[in-house]
Image: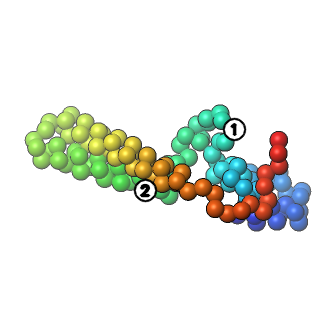
Amino acid sequence: MNRLRNAYLEMHPELEPHFITSPYDDLPGAMQTLGIDTSGQQRLGSVFHGFISLPGMLTVIVAADAGAIGGLAALGFGAPTAGVLAAGAVAFAVALVLLGNWGRRSVRRFGPMVEPHFPSPKK
């Protein structure tokens, strides 16, 4: 998509104010398109970006399932309502952290594999 945006801007540079994502296909351009801050200043959008991607949404859904299973297990052991809620919350949090870390490690293992044709300009 970044390469297509670059082609659109080559044909019609006057359209640049209408694009909010990057036309550059290198890593900084792709990260800007994804809404991930690479300037070193952590923004709130960059922190929560992982939750709006497909792997992030699936992580939350699976963690919610783990929370439900944790609550049901506590209920099966005869825990009071507060204990069931606490067990569900703990199971959700543990699953969210474990799955999030696993996903982050699996993505960082691979470097950029595509050679950029339209690198970002040097600042």
For residue 57, say whether it is visible: no
For residue 11, say whether it is visible: yes
Task: Please indicate whether residue 18 sits to the left or right of residue 1 in the image.
Answer: right
Q: Residue at x 72, y 52 (%)?
A: 29
The type of residue carrying mark 1 is Ser
Query: Of helix, strand and loop, which one carries label 1?
Result: loop
**Image quadrant assignment for residue 39:** top right
Q: Which residue is mark 1?
A: 39
The percent coordinates of residue 97 (x first, y second) are 39, 43
Q: Nearer the viewer, residue 16 or 107?
A: 107
Q: Residue at x 23, y 46 (%)?
A: 70
**Number of numbered discs on residues:** 2
Q: Residue at x 83, y 49 (%)?
A: 121
Q: Residue at x 52, y 48 (%)?
A: 50
Q: Nearer the viewer, residue 10 or 39?
A: 39
- Which circle's residue, 2 or 1, is located before the other in the chain? 1
| Image coloring type | rainbow
Task: Please indicate whether residue 59 sits to the left or right of residue 94 in the image.
Answer: right
Q: Which residue is mark 2?
A: 58
Q: Closer to the observer: label 2 or label 1?
A: 1
Query: Of helix, strand and loop, which one carries label 2?
Result: helix
Task: Please indicate whether residue 49 sits to the left or right of residue 23 in the image.
Answer: left
- Which quadrant would the N terminus be assigned to in this image? bottom right
The type of residue carrying mark 2 is Leu
Task: Please indicate whether residue 51 sits to the left or right of residue 113 in the image.
Answer: left
- Which quadrant would the C terminus be assigned to in this image? top right
Q: CA distance from mark 2 to mark 1?
A: 28 Å
The percent coordinates of residue 115 (x first, y second) are 71, 62
